[in-house]
Structure formats: structure tokens, C-alpha cells
Amino acid sequence: MNKIDVIFRKWNNGNILALFPHEVNTYGGHVTSYEHVGQHSNADYVGCIIKTRPANTDEYTPLKRELEGIGYKLNVVKKQNYNKFLDNWNLLNK
């Protein structure tokens, strides 16, 4: 299984969000996200970036372990590669 890019962010309430910035799952360009509560969901990438701050390693390690425990092979990145996002969006919209 290939590694999947993930960005870990922290909400103001302390919850950690995992954004999969290149996993486009709607025609509107939403990406996949994951949290302890609610688990997988669609997310507006830009909206989430605006409303959160980067999570540090200590903050995101529990969520990272949870994701790895359900089978994810993760590549932690700091930001979205827009070309990679567009490539996946174009595949969805063929």
C-alpha cells in the first residue's frame, strides 16, 4: 500500500483533525478528513486551514496511531500540493 499524505491541524477546542489534502471525494473539491469523534468526513480544505492551527507532533501522535491502526500508511506533510490535488480532482471529474 502506498503512503497517503496527511496534514494534522488543531481546532480551537483542542480536537485534532487529519486532512488528506489530495484525496478528493466530491465534485466540489472537498477532501477526506478524519477525527476521533465522527471519524471520516468530507472537508473544505481551505476552510479547515483558516479555522485551525498546525498540530505539533505530541498533539497529533494519538490520532496518527489511530489511523495507522486501521491500516493507513501515512506521510505527514505541512501543506497541500495543489498540482497533486488537481490531478486527483480531474480523475474524479472524467
Image (tube, rainbow, N blue to C red):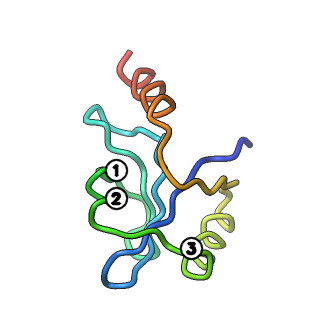
CA gap, disc 3 and disc 1: 18 Å
Outermost residue, top side:
94
Residue drawn at 37 percent across, 57 percent down: 41
Residue 16 in the image, given as x and y percentages of width and height: 45, 74
Residue 23 in the image, given as x and y percentages of width and height: 47, 41
Residue drawn at 59 percent across, 48 percent down: 5
Give the mark, 3 or 1, whose residue is nearer the N terminus. Answer: 1
Q: In the drawing, does residue 50 fall left or right of residue 6?
A: left
Q: Which label sits in the foreground, 3 or 1?
A: 1
As helix, strand or loop, the secondary structure at mark 1 comes to helix
CA gap, disc 1 and disc 2: 6 Å
Give the mark, 3 or 2, whose residue is nearer the N terminus. Answer: 2
Residue drawn at 32 percent across, 53 percent down: 43
Residue indicated by mark 1: 45
Residue 25 picture quarter: top left
Q: Which mark is residue 49?
A: 2
Residue indicated by mark 3: 63
Vertical arrangement, residue 13 with respect to residue 33, above or below: below
Q: Would you call the spot at circle 3 few (<14 residues within 10 Å), some (14-19), or many (20 or more)?
A: some
* Amino acid on which the number 1 mark rests in the picture: Tyr
Residue drawn at 39 percent across, 70 percent down: 53
Give the quadrant of the N terminus.
Answer: top right
* Amino acid on which the number 2 mark rests in the picture: Ile
Residue 71 in the image, given as x and y percentages of width and height: 68, 58
CA gap, disc 3 and disc 2: 18 Å
Whether residues under marks 1 and 2 lie with C-beta atoms below 8 angstroms apart, the answer is yes
Q: Which label sits in the foreground, 1 or 2?
A: 2
Total marks in image: 3
